[in-house]
Amino acid sequence: MITHRTIACLLFAVSCASAHAYVSLSKSTFERDRIDVMLQYVALPEAIKESLYALAVNQDAQVELANNTYDRPLFVSYPQLAQEIVCIELGDLPTPVSPLLNLSAYFGNRVHLFHKNDGLTGRIVNGARSFGGNKVRKLEFLLADAVMHNAHSVMTYGALGSNHVVATGACCKQLGLQCTALLTPQPLGEIVCRNLLLMRAYDIEIILNPNRAIRNVQTACSFVQSKYHCGQMPYLIPTGGSCPIGAIGFVNAAFELREQIARGDLPEPDYIYVPVGSCGTIAGLMLGVRAAGLKSKVVGVGVFPDNDPLDPYFVPQIVSLLNKTNTFLADKGASFPLFEWDARDVEIRLNFGGSAYGVPSPEAQEAKALFQTLENVRLDTTYSAKAAAGMLHDVISGTVDGSVVLFWNTFCADAPVDNGAIARLPKPFQRFFD
């Protein structure tokens, strides 16, 4: 919600720009970079852009990380990257791999099904497991970059029940960073309500935006408010953490998988199934699989409905992120291979997204029930169950007969909440619990 105070702050910023009263634009460094990053995702009028630039001030470009980790599998394979890319250990890695024996038997053992549980990425903090899921992998690199650039606060985007927002808040709390999330509506359900309460538990400032146009305005307002409250503009993480730095988390995940294959935890998969939303997970995993020399084919299952306008952009968005992440890593480590990527490299299933984002499809409901009944594995119907539905369709159709198939579970199922926190949510969010 945009308050009168927010509007006043933004108007003040405009007046600063028009009068050139705050600071010289030509001398601003990292804060201007933060604005430039934000403008990659947000369309703003020129006057507002110049207002934000006018508030930018000189800062040291980076600080030394005391808790930089060098032992992630990607760094073991490419040591030069460890000298160029920062990473903070936030995840409990590697995550376990196990055979889905009952599910394989259910399909007559025509395929050999395995499960990698990224729901267990959350670290044990004060005797309790922090929120996990696939986003923690991305946040190890994104928040390390934020801390290295001396950020005090982080801002990100997500839907009402965003797993990414909860994971970002949980990791920010470990690092002492303030977290703000701009949320857009989605259909209500058990996981949405659970995640809203977790956002409260992790002290995330949540702001409800009814659509993207208002979210764009609120982004500029929040940049100004953060300037006054925290002394600097926030470090922006895009939806899902899906950008080259975030995607590195799943490049690293592929090297982690290679180590597990070498240890005999599972045979080398012929196929790996993952959900596809903001595209960072599949892009990073595809790049990592190729760089690690694995034969596996990564298959993405779209979480949006077939008639959603985002569907046609899945493939080009994945290819774009693949190329950007690959170039970034090759620039940072001369020995990291640079591949050519195009639409022919991407395999996507688009008919399991349901009627709308966040609405369970019948196939996802069936997959969720089958995993729960046969394997005691919990899935969510927004992401992981839709990916499972795509995988099971290929099993039933015989597409993957005789293959080793890995289901990469992105869902954090175990996250106890305090229902008493409802009263502590901002008023616009309390009505979702009526």
Image (tube, grey):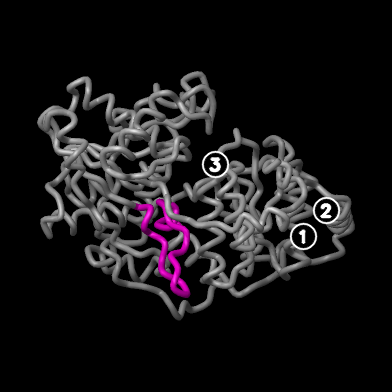
What's the mark number on residue 190?
3
- State the SS at label 1: helix
The residue type indicated by label 2 comes to Thr
Check contact, mark 1 vs mark 2: CB within 8 A: yes
On whether residue 124 falls in the magenta region, the answer is yes
- The residue nearer to you, when weighing 307 against 188, is 188
**Residue at the disc numbered 1:** 225
Residue 254 against residue 81 in the figure, above or below:
above
Q: Is residue 116 magenta?
A: no
Q: Residue 322 location, x and y as percent?
A: 37, 43
Q: Earlier in the sequence, mark 3 or mark 2?
A: 2
From where the camera sits, is residue 135 visible?
Answer: yes
Give the alpha-carbon distance from disc 1 to disc 2, as whole Å: 7 Å
Q: Which residue is mark 2?
A: 6
Return the residue nearer the eye: 108 or 41.
Answer: 108
> Whole-percent x and y of residue 394?
24, 25
Extent of the magenta region: 118-138
For the residues bearing labels 1 and 3, Cβ distance under 8 angstroms: no
Q: Quadrant of residue 353?
A: top left
Kindly identify the amino acid type of the residue bearing the numbered disc 1: Gln
